[in-house]
Image (cartoon, rainbow, N blue to C red):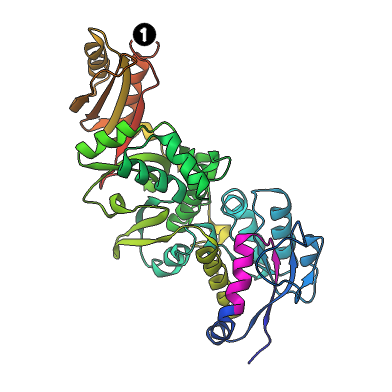
Amino acid sequence: MTQPLRIALAGLGTVGSGVIRLLNENGAMIAQRAGRPISVVAVSARNRNADRGVDISPYKWVDNMADFGADSEVDCVVELIGGADGPALDLARNSLQHRKSVVTANKAMIAHHGMELAKIAENENVALKYEAAVAGGIPVIKGLRDGASANRVERVYGILNGTCNYILATMEKHGSAFDAVLKDAQDLGYAEADPSFDIDGVDAAHKLAILAALSFGTAVDFGNVEIAGIRHVLAADISQAKALGYRIRLLGMARIDGDRLFQRVNPYLVPESHPLAHIEGSTNAVVAEGNFSGRLMFQGAGAGDGPTASAVVADLIDIARGDCGTVFAVPADQMEKSECAESGNRTGKSYIRFIVADKPGVLAEITAAMRDANVSIESLIQTEKTDEGLVLISMVTHQSRERDVVQSLEKLSGSSSLQAEPMVMHLLSDED
């Protein structure tokens, strides 16, 4: 058997410790599949003495992980410290420039700096792998880059954040309020103490930007992802959607409109007939639609030490086999940013929810604004008055331009009848 692939591990949190456990437990099988052993030779983290549930004494401890790049005894660096910039980015750059392959689970870094790092890796003929950055243990990166490479991908979309999916599915199941379910998610470890990145859609947007680049061969363009999260979704919205035959899921959606790239993270009403409507808990699911393959669906655990460590080690096995290849779907120096498609030009059905004062003329005021903006209403549900004297009005529009929907709400801006900002969600369809 040839010489082992010698790796340096930066970051010994749950995923880093999981990588060590996985290599220890499945080492012989991994060596057989990789064609040579994969060996941890050096580690670095903030606290050398923390109890991680794994023995790190066999490995060289390095106080300054930046030293990994110049270490002649290291072939590959695994970055698991996180953060779009700072030490993680410095480590990745330095390692690639020293002709060390890099494996990372850092979706923020790839979303913001993936093109720069890809060009360095390809120029130095080393690997930059990031399977663990999107959808945890699901092999969606390899599936899109390699398995679907003969296809023109028409669109890619899915449930990209397990925290949000857990919250929405739990609200749906129990009729609970958002804040209560979020607290439960934090207590269970599904949500961070500061959950903003998850519930405001930023985490999903990082992943979507990466998937779009893989699917369409365009440069990663996180800055042009339209982002809306779930913090304003009410239990009543979920109930109304269910009555209409839909379930609410936070989706990332990307496709090419003409020669422009459309990218959006937003709560969608998903038809109950669609597989994504039945994804529950913290599961992730990605759908890619190829012109020859048809619909491909990747589903599984989107986070956790085991699934994420599995994805990291799968990348290490590829590197041990000598697989460098392109970082994205095509060589990085051939990838260019696509112009951004304006969502206002898109046509579809929308769900709009109003919280209004219970007084005469409110519904007429709303419908007049919709009429004047050329938006027609397909269905409407009005709830009974709450203890606070408020009424919830939910409606689904006919096919309308999104720009017209926005205009109808602008006509209502400042109205004394509205007691909260209207909530707009789009209905998932084959035309999205």
180 or 407, which lies in front? 180
- In the image, residue 107 sits, relative to residue 19, either above or below, namely above
Q: Magenta segment, which residues?
A: 8-24
Q: Secondary structure at mark 1?
A: loop
Instruction: Pinpoint residue 176: horizontal percent, then vertical percent.
Output: 36, 37
Q: Quadrant of residue 401?
A: top left
Q: Which residue is mark 1?
A: 416
Give the position of the N terminus as an image quadrant: bottom right
- In the image, residue 311 sits, relative to residue 174, either above or below, namely below
Q: Would residue 318 appear left or right of 358 to someone viewing this image?
A: right
- The chief SS type of the magenta part is helix
Q: Residue furthest left?
A: 378
Q: Quadrant of residue 320?
A: bottom right
Res 116 visible: yes
135 or 154, which lies in front? 135
Residue at horizontal 23 percent and vertical 39 percent from the top: 242
Q: Amino acid at mark 1?
A: Ser
Give the position of the C terminus as an image quadrant: top left
Instruction: Pinpoint residue 384: horizontal percent, then vertical percent.
Output: 23, 20
49 or 219, which lies in front? 49
Res 257 visible: no
Q: Would residue 112 appear left or right of 342 to someone viewing this image?
A: right
For the image shown, how many numbered marks are present on the structure? 1
Q: Residue furthest bottom?
A: 1
Mark 1 crowd level (few <14, some 14–19, many ≥20, 10 Å Cα) = few
371 or 291, which lies in front? 371
Instruction: Pinpoint residue 342: horizontal percent, then vertical percent.
Output: 40, 35
